[in-house]
Amino acid sequence: MTTDALDPKSNDPDSHILDLPYDVLYLIFTFGCIQTSHKQHDFPVMISHVCRLWRQYALDTPGFWTSLRFKNPIPDIEKYRTWLGRSKNSPFDLEIGWRPFIGASMKHVKAIMRLVFPHIQRLRSLQVSDVPFKIRQVIFNRLNNVHLPSLETLHVKRGWSDDEKPALTDRKFNPFRHGDAANMKHVILEEIPYGHVIHRFKNLRTLSITNVKIFKDSSRNNAKTVQDILLLIPDLRLLHIHTERSFGHIPENPTLPPTTHFSLEELSFTATESDITAIVCALVLPSLRRICHSSGRDVGIDPCCLPIMARARLGHPHPNLLSLRLCGRQARNSSAEDSLNMEFLGRALAGLLRLESLELESVDLDHSRHLTCLSRTGPMLKKLAFTCCSGLVLKELQAVIQSRRDPKGMGSNSLEYVHVVDTLVTLQQLHKEAEEQGLGRDAGFNITISDGQYPHRIVVIGGE
């Protein structure tokens, strides 16, 4: 074995890819296999056709042959029979799409199940997407009495068609009813009832539910739904709930007695503002890092949640939160109420020692008075953004930033990004005031209006 092939300065004309150590070549193959799109040629087949040595590498690596995807009109039964043999005792992944069931659907689904059933205890993940109800029924009926010790991931997406109405039996989706999948860790259900699943698999790490009916017209009941799910699955790390946004909620006091879940790290959902308020106030999540939309953007939290987040006696409900986005209600003429709630901002931030991103949107900063707390909170804060906030004074913002940097104070240079986003007229006025006060001459405080198109912004710290 030689290392010359790994040396970029080597001029040895005999250096060759075949001189790579086996473990390095194995990594190259493995990464290539992972990153290759399923729409391209099968990667392990490609490398096995290059030369005799590469073919031997491919055949000696069972993990290359563990991905079975039935997405063609004619199932590749014989091809995957060979793959299952080459995979030896390695866990395998099974993905079944809708294309094999356009024509001879029952024949094809039975052929697929006959192929995989002798190896079913090695099944690591099962994805069934967009297939007709009768096909999904055949698949899970066949697995009804099976013990699946290797199964960790289940992804089921309901198939919709113009001539197929929701089946009554869909309401009782209860996979592996008389069998077992004790090591199930990740479940994704799209328009599939989730009730039996969350009662069966209580050791889940990830649960993603897409269901238009999961949230109703009562914010209190919607918060109770989230509470109930978390209470059933104590080790859950990620909970994603995707539903259609509904309006016209029943007027009510949304506050529920809070429940505590110690493991959840990310909560993602699509909901109305009242739903968000009810859910955030109903949960104590010591491990939570993010509250976000299904799109990935942080959920806008109403300032009315700040008094609950500021309860020092009971401890912060989300002490490990990494990002926080506060959205006021100026458009609804509630700025006075928001201003009262903003009085609790400092105490709320004092409990967020790991916070890295703070976004304030449509809130009244009361001539930057509500920003003074940032000079003593958020020691790890990297991003600070203001969007359409009233009462922002750049001179006061400068004082806060300098106070954070003062070695006699917090001594923190963590801020990497401070932007102000607003209308061009508002930004021009802020910029004019800053120039009159000489802030632009401060080498550590750059004030420039972005040359980019909408949204217009003032860049205080950082780039575009």
Image (cartoon, helix red, strand yellow):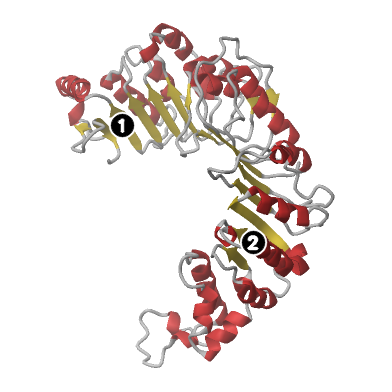
Callout 2, which amino acid?
A: Leu
Mark 2 closeness class: few <14, some 14–19, many ≥20 residues within 10 Å = some
Image location of residue 264, percent across then percent down: 64, 37
195 and 223: which one is in front?
195
Residue located 71% across and 67% down the image: 116
Q: Is residue 140 above or below residue 359?
A: below
Question: Which residue is drawn at the image coordinates 63% and 69% (left, top)?
Answer: 66
Q: Nearer the viewer, mark 1 or mark 2?
A: 2
> Label 1's element?
strand
Distance of mark 1 from mark 2, alpha carbons? 47 Å
Toward the viewer: 425 or 378? 425
Q: Which mark is residue 94?
A: 2
Residue occupying the far bottom of the picture: 14
Q: Amino acid at mark 1?
A: His
Location of residue 14 in the rendering, given as x and y in whole percent from the top left corner: 40, 93
Q: Is residue 461 visible?
A: yes
Query: Which residue is label 1 attached to?
Result: 419
Q: Is residue 312 visible?
A: no
Front residue of 453/74: it is 74
For the N terminus, give its image quadrant.
bottom right
Q: Position of residue 188 (x, y in %)?
A: 62, 45
Q: Secondary structure at mark 2?
A: strand
Asked which quadrant contains residue 417, the reply is top left
Asked if the residue at tag 2 contacts the one at tag 1, i.e. Cβ–Cβ closer than 8 Å, the answer is: no
The quadrant holding residue 409 is: top left
Residue located 57% across and 56% down the image:
98
The relative height of residue 99 versus residue 51 in the rendered view (above or below) is above
* Residue 289 - label: none
- The relative height of residue 452 versus residue 14 in the rendered view (above or below) is above
